[in-house]
Image (cartoon, rainbow, N blue to C red):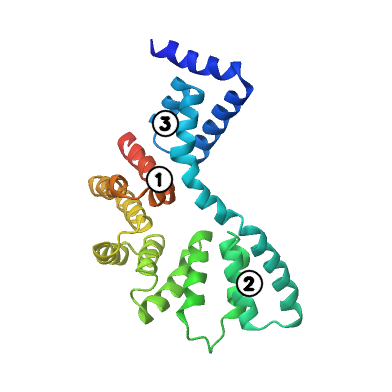
Amino acid sequence: MLYCSTRMGIFSALLNPYSFLLVALAIIHFIRRRPDTYWLYIILFLGPLGAAIYLVVEALPDLGLLRQSFKVFPRRKRIHELEAAVLDNPSAGNYEELADLYMEDGNFAKARACYDRAISSRTDSPDPFYRRGVCEVQLGDFNAAVTDLERVVQKEPGYDFHRARGLLAHAYANTGQPAKADELFQQVTVISTLSETYYNYATFLAAQGRTAEAREWAQKILAKKPTMPGYLRRRERPWFRKANGLLLRLRAS
C-alpha cells in the first residue's frame, strides 16, 4: 500500500512537467538542507501537493538565509579592491579588513596570512588574535590556536559569548592536554549553550573513551531542536547532523 502511494505520487508528478519541476525542486532542497526525514515521505507520497507544502513550510523561510549568500558578490568585489590597495598601502587596517573578508569567505589560509601582517607588537585588541585563532582551528593548527586563544581568554574570558574559551578547550584537546581541555570544557558548558562547544566536548569525551558522557552531550544538542524557533533550527542543522553522526558512531563502537 505504501509502495503504491509512493508510485502514484511520483507518477502524477511525471504527467505534468510543472509538477515534476515542483517535486524536483523540493527534493533538491531536501538533499541540500536535510530537514526532518518525514518531509521526504510527504514529497514522495503526495507528489506535487506534498512538494508545494514542503516548499512553503521549509524552503520559503530559507529565503532569509539565501539573501545572505548574495552578500558574497559585494564581498568579493571589496576583496579585490583591498588586494590592490595593500600593494600601495600595506597598513595594518587594510590587512585586517582583508583578513576579515577572507574569513567570511571561508578562505582561512589567506585570512590567517593577512592577520599575521595586521598584528604587530603594538596590537592590544583581542579581535585579530581571536579571529586568527579561529582560522588556525579551521586549518588544524591547534598549537598556534592555543597561543592566540589563550591571549584572548586572559584578556576577556567571556569573549564572543564564551566561544573563545570553548575553542581554546577544543585546541587543548587536540594538542595532548586532556586535563586542561576537560577542566575548561566543564567551565564553559555551565555558561554557554553553543552547539559547537557541546559537539567539541562530546568528541573529546568520545576520544577519551567516556562514551556515556559523549552520548549525553551529543543528545543535548538534539534536545534543543524542539524548542528552537524555525530560523534557528535551520541555522543549527549542521550541528544536528554532526550530533546524529557522532551518536551513530558511538553506537557502532
- The reply to whether the C-beta atoms of the residues labelled 3 and 1 are less than 8 Å apart is no
For the question of whether residue 142 can be seen, the reply is yes
**Where in the figure is residue 102, as x and y percent of width and height?**
61, 65
Assign a secondary structure to mark 3.
helix
Identify the residue under disc 2. 98
Residue at position x 45%, y 32% from top?
Answer: 53
In the drawing, what numbered circle is on residue 242? 1
187 left or right, relative to 136? left
The quadrant holding residue 81 is bottom right
Q: Amino acid at mark 3?
A: Trp
Pick whichever of labels 3 and 2 is earlier in the sequence.
3
Side of 192 relative to 114 (left or right): left
Residue 34 visible to the viewer: no
Q: Residues within 10 Å of mark 1 (few under 14, many from 20)?
A: some
Instruction: Find disc 3 in the rendering and name its residue.
Output: 39
Measuring 63% from the left and 22% from the top, which residue is drawn there? Answer: 17
Numbered disc 1: secondary structure: helix
Q: What element does badge 2 sit on? A: helix
Q: How many marks?
A: 3
- In the image, 169 versus 7, the foreground residue is 7
Closer to the eye: label 2 or 1: 2
Residue depicted at x 37% and y 76%: 153
Label 2: how many Cα within 10 Å (few below 14, some 14–19, many 20+):
many
Q: CA distance from mark 3 to mark 1?
A: 20 Å
Q: Quadrant of the N terminus?
A: top left
